[in-house]
Amino acid sequence: MKKYEQDGVLTLDDLVLPSDKQLEKGVAFIECVQEIPCNPCVDACPFGAISMKDINAPPIVDYDKCTACGQCVGICPGLAIFVIKVVDDKVLITLPYEFYPVPEVGDSVQALDRKGETVGVAVVRKIRKKNKTMIITIESSKNLAMEIRNIRVKK
Ligand code: SF4
Ligand code: SF4
């Protein structure tokens, strides 16, 4: 049995990582590994960058086809899709957010890892809404690019 099947927390070893160059271009990073009958992410991508071997298979992102447009982020019912773009020594992470309070652009927020533990700080750069899901772009340190997967807002 894999570790995430016991504790529910994925590690980078469970995922297919983009290259440094692809991270600088910006890519969708999907943290969905279980075999479940779900595929709205495939249909959401206007560039055909997300595929599946079959409806039960985990999604695969073609990092070269992905334009980092973010259309897929708010579609996933599992909140499993992030867009990551490295710019110099910073990273922009676009993530789905369904909690209160809702932050405002310019707010400083706590950056959380996959376990929900605080790993640093981030600044909110952009907020959009897709259905009932907020799509929030934060900026933080480049070294946290593959760690930050949620935020905590203090109001
Ligand atoms: S970010 Fe845009 S181009 Fe990339 S996989 Fe998602 S929908 Fe497709
Ligand atoms: S929509 Fe989300 S949960 Fe469903 S297959 Fe795609 S990434 Fe996985």
Image: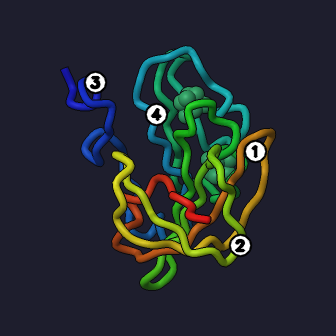
Mark closer to the observer (1, 4):
4
Q: Mark 2 belongs to which amino acid?
A: Val
Q: Identify which residue, 46 or 151, lies in the foreground.
A: 151
Please tell me whether residue 125 is drawn above or below residue 12 in the rendered image: below
The answer as to whether callout 4 falls within 8 Å of ligand 2 is yes
Find residue 81 and name its label.
none
Q: Tell me the quadrant of the picture where the N terminus can be found.
A: top left
The answer as to whether callout 1 falls within 8 Å of ligand 1 is yes
Q: Mark 4 belongs to which amino acid?
A: Cys
Residue sitting at 63 percent across and 59 percent down? 68
In the displayed orientation, state which residue is furthest to the bottom: 88
What's the distance in space between the residues labelled 3 and 4, CA to CA? 12 Å
The mark nearer the N terminus, 3 or 2, is: 3
- What residue does disc 2 label? 105
Which of the 4 image quadrants contains residue 8? top left
Mark closer to the observer (3, 4):
3
Q: Mark 3 belongs to which amino acid?
A: Glu
Q: Quadrant of ligand 2?
A: top right
Tell whether 64 sits left or right of 101: left
- What residue does disc 1 label? 46
The mark nearer the N terminus, 3 or 1, is: 3
Q: Secondary structure at mark 1?
A: loop
Please tell me whether residue 146 is drawn above or below residue 38 in the rendered image: below
- What residue does disc 4 label? 32
Mark closer to the observer (4, 2):
2
Q: Determine whether label 3 and label 2 are within 8 Å by CB.
A: no
Tell whether 131 sits left or right of 23: right
What's the distance in space between the residues labelled 1 and 4, CA to CA? 20 Å
What's the distance in space between the residues labelled 4 and 2, CA to CA? 28 Å
- What residue does disc 3 label? 5
The mark nearer the N terminus, 1 or 4, is: 4
